[in-house]
Amino acid sequence: MSDSQFPFAWTHGAIWLLHDGTIYTVPGFHDEWIKQHQDLVPGCTNVSDVILTYHWISVVTYAKNYIEVMIDSRKNMQSIDTALTYLGLHLEKWENTLLMAMQEDYYEKISVEDFNNLETLKIKLRGSE
């Protein structure tokens, strides 16, 4: 069961974000959570497994309004859209985000101002086809 009754609810600390907005809070380390929740992520042993197998998004909020977001691939528009939806709904709660895509070994710094032109941001994150 999700930790929030509201999709895309803001949560401090570490979470798993699913494409439908479901949030699972990670109270400690991701790997420990994965071991304890094999019913949700069977066969997974680490963060990479969950992200690449289930396309879940890892979101970690740090001090000073900084967030790290890890997605499976910058070619997966559903993952990009989900991450941007979460960030866009909470622009007042963060200042800088580092978005990382595992399959491409890619990262991009995103600021709140980047949301002034969402289509340009999506094109930048998607990269060349």
Image (cartoon, rainbow, N blue to C red):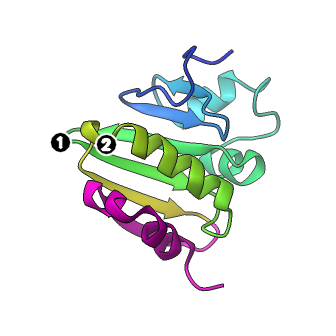
Instruction: Pinpoint residue 23: horizontal percent, then vertical percent.
Output: 57, 27
Query: Could you say whether the residue bearing mark 2 is in a helix, strand or loop?
Result: helix
In this picture, is 19 found above or below 8? below
Q: Please give left or right for residue 36 compared with residue 54 in the image.
A: left
Question: What is the quadrant of residue 39 in the picture?
Answer: top right
Q: Please give left or right for residue 116 compared with residue 5 in the image.
A: left
**Magenta part of the protein: which range?**
103-129
Tell me which residue sits at (59%, 64%) in the image.
102
In this picture, is 79 found above or below 14? below
| Residue neighbourhood size for the residue with mark 1, other residues' Cα within 10 Å, grouped as few (<14), some (14–19), many (≥20) | few
Instruction: Pinpoint residue 27: horizontal percent, then vertical percent.
Output: 46, 22
In this picture, is 59 found above or below 77? above
Query: Could you say whether the residue bearing mark 1 is in a helix, strand or loop?
Result: loop
Question: What is the quadrant of residue 14 in the picture?
Answer: top left
Magenta residue check for 111:
yes
Quadrant of the drawing holding the C terminus: bottom right
Question: What is the quadrant of residue 104 in the picture?
Answer: bottom right
Magenta residue check for 83:
no
Tell me which residue sits at (70%, 49%) in the image.
55
Tell me which residue sits at (59%, 85%) in the image.
128
Camera-nearest residue between 40 and 34: 40
Quadrant of the drawing holding the N terminus: top right
Camera-nearest residue between 120 and 21: 120
| Residue neighbourhood size for the residue with mark 2, other residues' Cα within 10 Å, grouped as few (<14), some (14–19), many (≥20) | some
Residue holding disc 1: 64
Amino acid type of the residue tagged 1 in the rendering: Lys
Q: Nearer the viewer, mark 1 or mark 2?
A: 2
Instruction: Pinpoint residue 12: horizontal percent, then vertical percent.
Output: 35, 28
Amino acid type of the residue tagged 2 in the rendering: Leu
Residue holding disc 2: 91
Mark 1 to mark 2 CA distance (whole Å): 14 Å
